[in-house]
């Protein structure tokens, strides 16, 4: 998923400063050797920016120009900082600090707080939602989960833009920002939240930056101490800095201009958090003597993918668009991007799952495939479609790798084996590191061959297999470098360092992720789904600036693909719905048939495929026609208030989330217990039997025959055949016998590679 795979994480350490420069292209070499004065690197997607700046730091250190302890490299995620530290270590530049803005600031704040303020630093509040809810209650406001999230986002935006509660209404008006509630109400909640923090002696994430800025501004002696330690600064993803982070950077630097920044204005997608590309775009104005270097050689994507990315930005407007970089692919030609139109969302999900299955069967690792969407709520239908197609998946942003129970258990076992060494009976006959790791993990569920299916047992195996592959990569890297074979203790130390940086090894499974969370990652094959007006650009993108950020978001999605790129949309949300959607405006002039010559050349695109149900292109049924087309019906409506439904969860319930529920709670609990038992015996996650929303729909409808049960979204033919008897018996209040569920390879189990099973909306 990243530019450096696990098999290439351990190359030989260069034996000299000049050796650090080997393998760099002319522009990357210019970055690496520009060690004095302010430097601005404008780096397009896939152009090797991390490679360039890590080699710059390493070359400076190895050449004796940059003292390792005097360099601070800052970025935006713990994972990126961990990867940077790993690369620097392999380049022989250990001792350089690579941290996130918040981690660097917190470290300084903890050290200087007793001297600047006295006493201990207040406790850091990890999650602010609960305190925001309490603040809202003090203001006599009751907020649901979504409103709380929005309110929290507004408070965070205010703080990173250095806006105090009283100034919030004016600031939001000046920024042209759409407040989720009356700005005066948000201002009151914001003020109450700040007071609650003081009452509870806690600080939040944004306070870490604010307080560090305050200390450095008010205490020149402390500021000079920090500047005495750090003389050189490198900032990655500079287009994403907020005004508060920029102020902190200025205080760190102290006007010395020993600064190197790297960014791409065309990848600015976090303005809702306060990020702005203005600092990147104005860098030359603030630093007239700056060296500006452009990286445009794209080593990631094929000419077809790069052509589409360039075509997408060629239609952009605004200041960021004026500074766009025209990428030049350095790879061999690949397949043209595929555009597919589907009748409805379940059909789209099935088509994507089928194509992913085909790629895997053709030898493409599941971990090299991603399905990217605009909002997280779109994931559920793709989760179910992949499960039904027998395709393993992982949710980006779900439980962290090193926090999984099996990984924690494996870490304990590996640490124990490393401690006891030759006295551990598990290691008998296991001479090299990979053999030792396999031996230890065999007691935790790892086997040479993966288990059948794609449930919890397979998920556990995939996690352990990722550790085995990492051990193999470490051993191969040491051998290639001519070094001593790694020990089990060294492997455990590597795992500890990765856990601290949240730098997880690769897990086999198709990645499901939002476009925002996909930034910084890459895959061989990428499916961009749900590309319709109202979703991309999202409905609430009203201003030209907001719409352009949505375009940049799509650009980020396109540039995640190395070789295979599929773009798709559906004409209606639900089966039989009115086909009144239209493809995203961003595809106009790019997709074939959209009326522009660019559509015939951008990315070498071929024609638009019409994805019938279960069919991914290649002349399948077009739209809603063909022998398997559904009977057209009007849009689904709430059975309580009559409003038209569009949300997938509401479609399953046949009512609005906020409308009164006639839930049979006793039945719902019985259904949950039954589902848990089925999932446990099958070794699969509970949602593979029925999702929570489907169980709620059943417990609300209480169907009394197979026909009524089949009409509930999420209960199609296959699941009706498999589970219908049990569910109807539970609805009738009957007790179930102790029959075993059917084997996972039977009806409803993993499907053959040429079959596409059902989706959460309908399994027919």
Image (cartoon, helix red, strand yellow):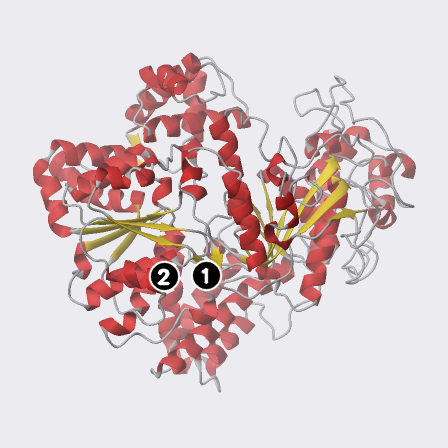
From the viewer's perspective, is residue 333 above or below residue 152? below
Q: Residues within 10 Å of mark 1 (few under 14, many from 20)?
A: some
Residue 443 position in % (x across, y down) = 55, 71
Give the residue drawn at x 52%, y 66%: 466
- Please name the residue that numbered disc 2 is placed on: 51
What secondary structure is marked by label 1? loop
When the figure is inspected, residue 344 is found, relative to residue 132, above or below; the finding is below
Query: Dots 2 and 1: beta carbons under 8 Å?
Result: yes
Q: Residues within 10 Å of mark 2 (few under 14, many from 20)?
A: some
Q: Position of residue 212 (x, y in %)?
A: 22, 37
Measure the alpha-carbon separation of dots 2 and 1. 9 Å
Question: Relative to the observer, which residue lies in front, 25 or 60?
Answer: 25
Q: Which mark is residue 3?
A: 1
- Residue 85 in view of the camera: no
**Which label's residue is closer to the chain start, 2 or 1?**
1
Is 493 placed above or below 252 here? below
Does residue 609 appear anywhere in the picture?
yes
**Residue occupying the point 41% across, 27% down:** 131
Q: Quadrant of residue 648?
A: top right
Q: Position of residue 72 (x, y in %)?
A: 23, 52
The one nearer the camera, 275 or 219, is 275
Task: Answer above or below: position of 212 versus 425.
Answer: above
Left or right: residue 325 compared with residue 528: left
Task: Give the residue at x 76% y 43%.
Answer: 342
The residue at 67%/57% (across/down) is 455
């Amino acid at each position: 998923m990243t530019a450096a795979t696990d098999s290439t994480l351990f190359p030989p350490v260069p034996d000299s400063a000049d050796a650090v420069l080997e393998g760099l292209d002319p522009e990357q070499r210019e970055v690496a050797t520009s060690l004095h004065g302010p430097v601005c690197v404008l780096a397009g997607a896939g152009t090797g920016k991390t490679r360039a700046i890590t080699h710059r730091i390493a070359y400076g250190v190895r050449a004796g120009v940059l003292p390792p302890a005097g360099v601070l490299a800052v970025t935006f995620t713990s994972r990126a900082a961990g990867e940077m530290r790993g690369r620097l270590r392999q380049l022989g530049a250990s001792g350089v600090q690579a941290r996130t803005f918040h981690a660097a600031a917190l470290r300084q704040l903890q050290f200087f707080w007793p001297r600047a303020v006295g006493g201990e630093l207040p406790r850091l509040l990890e999650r602010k939602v609960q305190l925001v809810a309490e603040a809202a209650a003090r203001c006599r406001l009751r907020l649901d989960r979504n409103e709380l999230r929005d309110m929290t986002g507004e408070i965070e935006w205010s703080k990173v833009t250095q806006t105090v509660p009283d100034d919030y209404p004016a600031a939001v008006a000046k920024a042209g920002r759409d407040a989720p509630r009356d700005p005066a109400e948000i201002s009151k909640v914001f003020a109450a939240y700040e007071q609650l923090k003081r009452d509870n002696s806690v600080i939040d994430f944004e306070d870490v930056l604010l307080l560090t800025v305050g200390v450095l501004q008010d205490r020149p002696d402390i500021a000079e101490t920090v500047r005495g330690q750090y003389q050189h600064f490198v900032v990655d993803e500079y287009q994403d800095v907020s005004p508060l982070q920029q102020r902190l950077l200025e205080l760190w630097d102290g006007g010395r201009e020993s600064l190197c920044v790297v960014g791409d204005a065309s990848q600015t997608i976090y303005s809702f958090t306060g990020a702005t590309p203005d600092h990147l775009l104005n860098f030359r104005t603030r630093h007239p003597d700056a060296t500006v270097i452009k990286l445009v050689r794209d080593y990631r994507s094929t000419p077809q993918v790069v052509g589409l990315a360039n075509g997408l930005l060629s239609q952009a407007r605004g200041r960021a668009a004026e500074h766009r970089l025209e990428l030049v692919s350095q790879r061999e030609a690949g397949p043209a991007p595929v555009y597919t139109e589907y009748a409805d969302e379940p059909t789209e999900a099935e088509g994507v799952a089928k194509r992913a299955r085909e790629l895997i069967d053709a030898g493409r690792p599941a971990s090299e495939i991603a399905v990217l969407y605009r909002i997280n709520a779109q994931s559920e239908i793709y989760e179910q479609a992949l499960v039904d197609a027998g395709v393993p998946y992982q949710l980006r942003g779900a439980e962290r790798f090193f926090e999984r129970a099996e990984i924690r258990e494996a870490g304990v076992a590996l640490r124990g084996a490393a401690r006891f060494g030759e006295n551990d009976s598990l290691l008998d006959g296991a001479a090299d590191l990979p053999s030792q790791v396999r031996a230890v993990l065999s007691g935790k569920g790892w086997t040479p061959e993966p288990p059948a299916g794609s449930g919890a047992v397979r998920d556990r195996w995939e996690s352990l297999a990722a550790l085995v592959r990492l051990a193999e990569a470490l051993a191969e890297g040491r051998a290639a470098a001519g070094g001593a074979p790694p020990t089990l203790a060294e492997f455990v130390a590597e795992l500890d360092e990765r856990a601290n940086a949240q730098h997880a090894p690769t897990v086999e499974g198709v990645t499901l992720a939002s476009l925002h969370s996909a930034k910084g990652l890459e895959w061989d094959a990428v499916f961009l789904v749900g590309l319709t007006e109202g979703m991309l650009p999202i409905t609430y993108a009203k201003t030209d600036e907001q719409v352009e950020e949505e375009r940049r978001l799509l650009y980020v999605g396109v540039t995640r693909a190395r070789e295979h790129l599929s773009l798709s949309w559906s004409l209606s949300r639900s089966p039989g719905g009115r086909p009144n959607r239209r493809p995203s405006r961003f595809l106009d002039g790019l997709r074939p048939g959209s009326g522009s010559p660019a559509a015939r050349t951008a990315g070498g695109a071929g024609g638009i495929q019409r994805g019938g149900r279960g069919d991914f292109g290649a002349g399948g049924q077009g739209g809603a026609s063909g022998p398997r087309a559904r009977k057209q019906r009007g849009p689904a409506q709430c059975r309580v208030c009559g409003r038209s439904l569009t949300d997938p969860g509401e479609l399953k319930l046949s009512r609005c989330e906020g409308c009164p529920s006639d839930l049979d709670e006793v039945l719902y609990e019985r259904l949950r217990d039954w589902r848990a038992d089925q999932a446990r015996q099958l070794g699969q996650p509970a949602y593979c039997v029925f999702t929570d929303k489907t169980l709620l729909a059943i417990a609300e409808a209480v169907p009394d025959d197979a026909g009524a049960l089949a009409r509930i979204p999420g209960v199609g033919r296959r699941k009706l055949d498999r589970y219908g008897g049990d569910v109807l018996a539970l609805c009738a209040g009957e007790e179930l016998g102790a029959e075993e569920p059917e084997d996972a390879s039977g009806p409803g189990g993993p499907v053959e590679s040429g079959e596409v099973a059902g989706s959460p909306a309908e399994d027919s």
